[in-house]
Image (cartoon, rainbow, N blue to C red):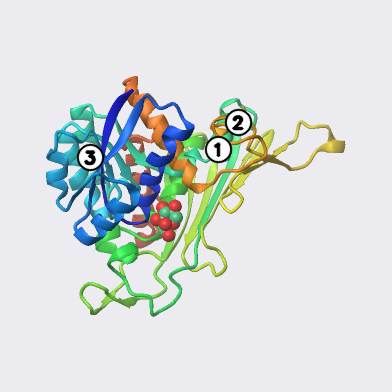
Amino acid sequence: MKKLNVGLIGCGFMGRTHSNAHHQIAQFFDAPYKTVLRAICDVNEEKAKAFGARWGYETVETDYRKMIARKDIDLVEITTPNNTHAEIAIAAAEAGKMIICEKPLALSVEQGEKMVAAVEKAGVPNLCSYNYRRVPAVTLAKQLIDEGRLGRIFHYRANFLQDWTISTDLPQGGDALWRLDVKVAGSGVTGDLLAHCIDTALWLNGGVTEVCAMTETFIKERKHNITGKVEKVGIDDACSFMCRFKNGSLGLFESTRYARGHKALYTFEINGEHASIKWDLHDPHRLQYFDHRDQSLVRGWRSVHVTDGDMPYMGKWWVPGLTIGYAESFVHQLNDFLVNAAQGKPTAPTFRDALETQRVCERVIESGKDRAWKTV
Ligand code: SOE
């Protein structure tokens, strides 16, 4: 089998999810390449060495440019903070590497457009890692919608609720807390959490035409871990928006890091003419389905346990009834990417697909600031 050498940049939480996918893929899937963890890269050498030793990377780099220039690297994975995605991805594309980049694609639409231009000019396989598409129950939702089971869609509703930034003592900046620093993250919950909801929505329900948002920053100042000073908080702590889709349906989205009791509650519900579906990340292997065409005596919400072998991806795992989880969505993503790359086909969401999500996010933020509807 052909080998594919991987160079991964960024040793945080997302670096772990991507590395784990490489460890699992060969055991469960028949990917057309054998991926080899050739190089790990992080500006922090100690961190990179420890991460490389734990996950089995053969070499360590501290400068991404050096890593990208290496002839023995085929696939570059970008799991660094958002403000570095564009620079690294453009350099990797110019060097002719395949690229998997963490979400959100970039800090802005302007940056995203440059990234799309670079990968399309170079003709390299590219993917933006919106992993929830590849949770089997979510993929099954796509299948049911494409089969026309829901009929005309009227409503799309999604939430992504967390509660980890409520403390006023929580600083911003550095390590995982870069998500609170607007210069590094670009935005708050809109780019970090709603971007997932928007990516899924664009996939399941098509394009968005206009948005109207309400945003809030509850805690206005926080100490910055890197400068040591108390600085203004520039991110949106909460964001709700309504929108219209091209297919005529109405959307309602809400995200916050101030919903006490919720850790990562991503939910969506879609209401169609004949049927509705809903999904919940805290119960990820279940898809709720209601079909009005059922006989009235037995009509009701069905809780479909998405573990049978004929359900998306599940035939590759254990036996019916046994579940998988969050980590496996990254394995599915990697496998789809490798299968398509070997056949010269794109894997969604490509950078171009992710640019559309970026565009919706940007309009949402603008709408929140201007308190006005924005055309996408
Ligand atoms: C933030 O807490 C976060 O880790 C996001 O960055 C991820 O994209 C999301 O999947 C879970 O929450």
Q: Which image quarter holds the C terminus?
A: top left
Q: Nearer the viewer, residue 329 or 346?
A: 329
Question: The residue tagged with tag 2: helix, strand or loop?
Answer: loop
**Disc 2 designates what residue?**
311
Q: Nearer the viewer, residue 200 or 209?
A: 200
26 left or right of 57 in image = right
Ligand 1 within 8 angstroms of badge 1 C-beta: no
Give the Cα separation between the discs numbered 2 and 1. Answer: 7 Å
The amino acid on which the numbered mark 3 sits, given as a three-letter code, is Met
Q: Looking at the picture, how far across and down is residue 131, in whole percent?
A: 44, 43
Name the N-terminal-most of marks 3 and 1. Answer: 3
Vertically, is 282 above or below 231? above
- For label 1, the crowd category at 10 Å Cα-Cα, with few meaning under 14, some 14 to 19 and many 20 or more, is many
Name the N-terminal-most of marks 2 and 3. Answer: 3
Give the Cα separation between the discs numbered 2 and 3. Answer: 34 Å
Quarter, ligand 1: bottom left
Vertically, is 14 above or below 225? above
Residue 150 numbered tag:
none
Q: Residue at x 39, y 53 (%)?
A: 364
**Disc 3 designates what residue?**
115
Q: Nearer the viewer, residue 263 or 166?
A: 263
Question: The residue tagged with tag 1: helix, strand or loop?
Answer: helix
Q: Are marks 2 and 3 in contact (CB under 8 Å)?
A: no
Residue 136 numbered tag:
1
Q: Residue 127's image quarter?
A: top left
Q: Are marks 2 and 1 in contact (CB under 8 Å)?
A: yes
